[in-house]
Image (tube, rainbow, N blue to C red):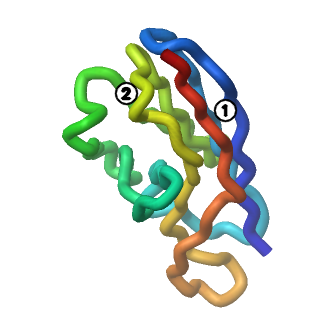
Amino acid sequence: QVQLVETGGGLVQAGGALRLSCAASGSIFSIKAMGWYRQAPGKRRELVAASTSGGSTNYADSVKGRFTISRDNAKNTVYLQMNSLKVEDTAAYYCNADLIRDYDRRELDYWGQGTQVTVSS
């Protein structure tokens, strides 16, 4: 089994900062990419930021310059530093990992359980 465990959500005032963490564990051979998605009520889930094992990153236009994704490959962990938060950043944030399982070498997508980020005005 593979698990993704997210931590770091919460309530913050506009202009504030939060840091999300997501640790992957279990039957992992390798991780190709990890990223963060978010879903606000009544809206579709959208990509926030992603990071490949090669070190490339991409961001949603709405968070460029404010959010930074980083990874600790030795710990199979991805972080999302969120600065200058806006009310519109309020959403459930989900960690995603594109990885290869160790026992069958299948490439699959896994999701965390989600962590709520609420930004107040």
Q: Residue 24 sits in which quadrant? A: bottom right
Task: Quote the CA–CA distance across marks 2 and 1.
Answer: 14 Å
Q: How far across and down, in percent of the image, does residue 33 sit?
A: 43, 58
Q: How far across and down, in percent of the image, does residue 19 sit?
A: 58, 24
Q: Of callouts 2 and 1, which one flags the residue occurring earlier in the amino acid sequence? A: 1
Q: Nearer the viewer, residue 117 or 43?
A: 43
**Could you tell me which residue is drawn at 24 percent across and 31 percent down?**
64
Residue most extreme to the left: 61
Vertical order, 41 against 75 (above or below): below
Q: Residue 15 sits in which quadrant? A: top left
Is residue 97 found left or right of 74 in the rendered image? left
Q: Secondary structure at mark 2?
A: strand
How many labels sit on residues? 2
Q: Secondary structure at mark 1?
A: loop
Is residue 57 found left or right of 10 in the rendered image? left
Residue bearing the label numbered 2: 67
Vertical order, 85 against 35 (above or below): above
**Could you tell me which residue is drawn at 74 percent across and 69 percent down?**
2
- The circle on residue 66 is none
Residue bearing the label numbered 1: 9
Residue type for callout 2: Phe
Q: Nearer the viewer, residue 3 or 7?
A: 7
Within 10 Å of the Cα at label 1, are there few (<14), some (14-19), or many (20+) other Cα atoms?
Answer: some
**Could you tell me which residue is drawn at 67 percent across and 67 percent down?**
28
Vertical order, 34 against 101 (above or below): above
Residue type for callout 1: Gly
Q: Nearer the viewer, residue 33 or 45?
A: 45
Within 10 Å of the Cα at label 2, are there few (<14), some (14-19), or many (20+) other Cα atoms?
Answer: many
Q: Nearer the viewer, residue 30 or 19?
A: 19
Q: How far across and down, in percent of the image, does residue 83 sit?
A: 42, 17
